[in-house]
Image: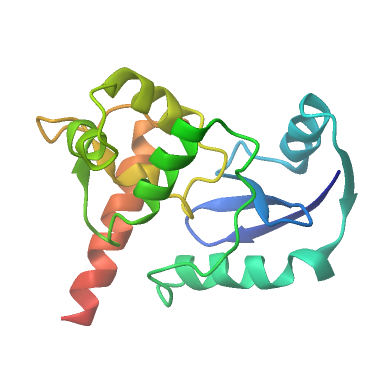
Amino acid sequence: MILHVESFAVPRFGPIIIGVTETGLRFLRFGPKSSIADAHEYAAKNKMETTENSAFTKAIREQIQEYFNGNRKKFNIVLDIEHLDAFAIKVLRATQNIPYGHTVSYGELAKQVNSTAYRAIGKIMANNPIPIVIPCHRVIGANGKLTGFSLGLATKRQLLDFESSQLKLLQ
């Protein structure tokens, strides 16, 4: 399997690295510490070849840029997550349904997938291969506090504030 990778930058959030297979978006990293090497490392770990092919990734890049420009609230991107276990897929699909600018607790997300495995859900969120498109930043602690985010709590807060500010502009 080939992972087509591309790197581009967006204002305030820095580099975005995406990896796309023939099936769909499989990998996304962003932030000042992200680099194209992250996608190559992911591919090697998953026994995939890589190619830098911006023609293949163009439509996905455009949707992500629209999100960061405040012009997209919901993605229309096919994801390649079928290699994950069934429970992880169920949790990630439920996470995709959290509305833009809103949050749910880990407990609420667990109820949505008919589970009490909060820690397992937390681990799935921590290992989310496609943050932003699968908006794990919208999952918070039961007490309303920010908890865990693979790219750091400051980035999680930045994303939530960004979405909140965009919603206010629409009002």
Q: In the picture, residue 47 is in which quadrant?
A: top right
Image point (56%, 70%), residue name: 63
Q: Residue 114, how many percent across, how many down?
A: 25, 35
Could one spot residue 141 in this view of the protein?
Answer: yes
Image point (55%, 45%), residue name: 130
What colour scheme was applied to this rendering of the protein? rainbow
In the displayed structure, 46 sits above or below 13; it is above
| Left or right: 61, with 40 as reference point | left
User: For the N terminus, which image quadrant?
Assistant: top right
Q: Residue 144, how many percent across, how many down?
A: 12, 36
Image point (22%, 80%), residue name: 170
| Left or right: 139, with 91 as reference point | left
Q: Which residue is more in the foreground, 125 or 110?
A: 110
Q: In the picture, residue 8 is in which quadrant?
A: bottom right
Could one spot residue 151 in this view of the protein?
Answer: no
Q: Residue 20, how many percent across, how many down?
A: 73, 54
